Image: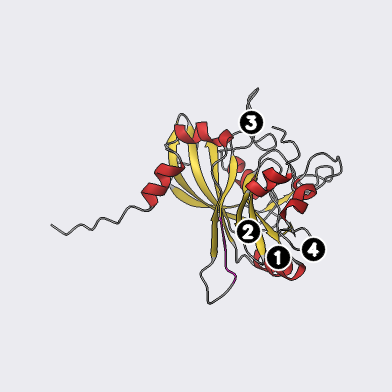
């Protein structure tokens, strides 16, 4: 699925959070975050639309894969970007991804602890399970199941390249549409069913962390519904229901 270069208006419409330090935008699937060796559309080219009065456009504080959608953090100035970079580096920022996978784990939650290494010299970004690779840990929880698919919430404890994609595939439940580690997209359908759903950023000890949620993109909705997702409004209502207390018999 190829996404064209966003217009200024489209970029501004994708801002989920804005403060003096950072922006969190809803990255569309199918577009690189920065310019690659082959050129083509990329989000960085459009960051000038997100200056909001500052002298320079924001810059990437981290990366998302080309085909991954969802929460992407940008630093609004150098000091902010450096601070965000340290938070990412030291694992202080928590990230939750939603994925639709083929099949699914037998249990309802668990961990995947598989070291990862580079696949080969020619495929610089591609990874593989490697006993001598870097330690890599992911946590997962099943939110729903249906039609031979599972809807997972994934939390990468470490931040290796393609970590969630490799971990799911190596565990026997590749992410739907993964054209590198899974079975690829079906003809005429969008590709990777991986979405950076939520990010939690602690900026101050005296204030609650910034928590940002990215809406489910269209290309995930059909398969999420088959696993029990009933839409954003239903989910929001469910999350705000009061806890029912029960007395012991």
Quarter containing the C terminus? bottom left
Is residue 115 found left or right of 126 in the rendered image?
left
In the image, farthest residue toward the bottom: 206
User: Mark 4 and mark 3: span between their CA atoms?
Assistant: 37 Å
Asked whether the beta carbons under mark 4 and mark 1 sit within 8 Å of each other, the answer is no
Residue 229: % across, % down: 44, 38
User: Is there any visible trace of residue 35 in the rendered image?
Assistant: yes
In the image, farthest residue toward the left: 249
Neighbourhood count class around disc 4 (C-alpha, 10 Å): few under 14, some 14–19, many 20 upward = few
Q: Secondary structure at mark 1?
A: helix
User: Mark 2 and mark 1: span between their CA atoms?
Assistant: 14 Å
Quarter containing the N terminus? top right
Residue that label 4 marks: 55
Residue in the foreground of this view, choosing between 229 and 75? 75
**Is residue 92 depicted above or below 129 in this figure?**
below
Neighbourhood count class around disc 2 (C-alpha, 10 Å): few under 14, some 14–19, many 20 upward = some
User: Mark 1 and mark 3: span between their CA atoms?
Assistant: 31 Å
Is residue 241 found left or right of 87 in the rendered image?
left
Residue that label 2 marks: 158
Residue 224: % across, % down: 49, 36
- N-terminal label among 3 and 2: 2
Asked whether the beta carbons under mark 4 and mark 2 sit within 8 Å of each other, the answer is no
Residue that label 1 marks: 85
Residue that label 3 marks: 190
- N-terminal label among 4 and 3: 4
Magenta segment:
199-203
Q: Is residue 186 magenta?
A: no
Q: Secondary structure at mark 3?
A: loop
Neighbourhood count class around disc 3 (C-alpha, 10 Å): few under 14, some 14–19, many 20 upward = some
**Is residue 91 depicted above or below 145 in this figure?**
below
């Amino acid at each position: 699925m190829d996404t064209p270069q966003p217009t200024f208006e489209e970029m501004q419409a994708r801002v989920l959070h804005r403060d003096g330090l950072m922006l969190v935008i809803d990255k569309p699937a199918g577009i690189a975050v920065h310019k690659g060796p082959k050129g083509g559309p990329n989000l960085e080219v459009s960051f000038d639309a997100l200056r909001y009065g500052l002298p320079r456009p924001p810059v990437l504080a981290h990366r998302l894969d080309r085909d991954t959608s969802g929460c992407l953090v940008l630093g609004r100035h150098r000091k902010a970007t450096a601070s965000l970079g340290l938070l990412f580096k030291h694992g202080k920022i928590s990230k939750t991804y939603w994925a639709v996978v083929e099949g699914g784990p037998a249990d309802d939650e668990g961990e995947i602890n598989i070291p990862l290494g580079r696949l080969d010299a020619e495929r610089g970004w591609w990874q593989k399970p490697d006993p001598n690779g870097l330690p890599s840990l992911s946590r997962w929880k099943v939110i729903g199941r249906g039609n031979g698919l599972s809807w997972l919430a994934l939390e990468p404890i470490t931040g290796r390249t393609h970590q969630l994609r490799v971990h799911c595939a190596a565990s026997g439940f590749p992410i739907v549409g993964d054209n590198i580690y899974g079975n690829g997209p079906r003809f005429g359908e969008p590709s990777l069913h991986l979405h950076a759903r939520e990010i939690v950023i602690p900026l101050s000890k005296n204030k609650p962390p910034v928590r940002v949620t990215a809406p489910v993109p269209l290309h995930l909705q059909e398969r999420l519904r088959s696993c029990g997702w009933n839409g954003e409004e239903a989910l929001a209502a469910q999350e705000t229901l009061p806890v029912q207390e029960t007395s012991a018999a």
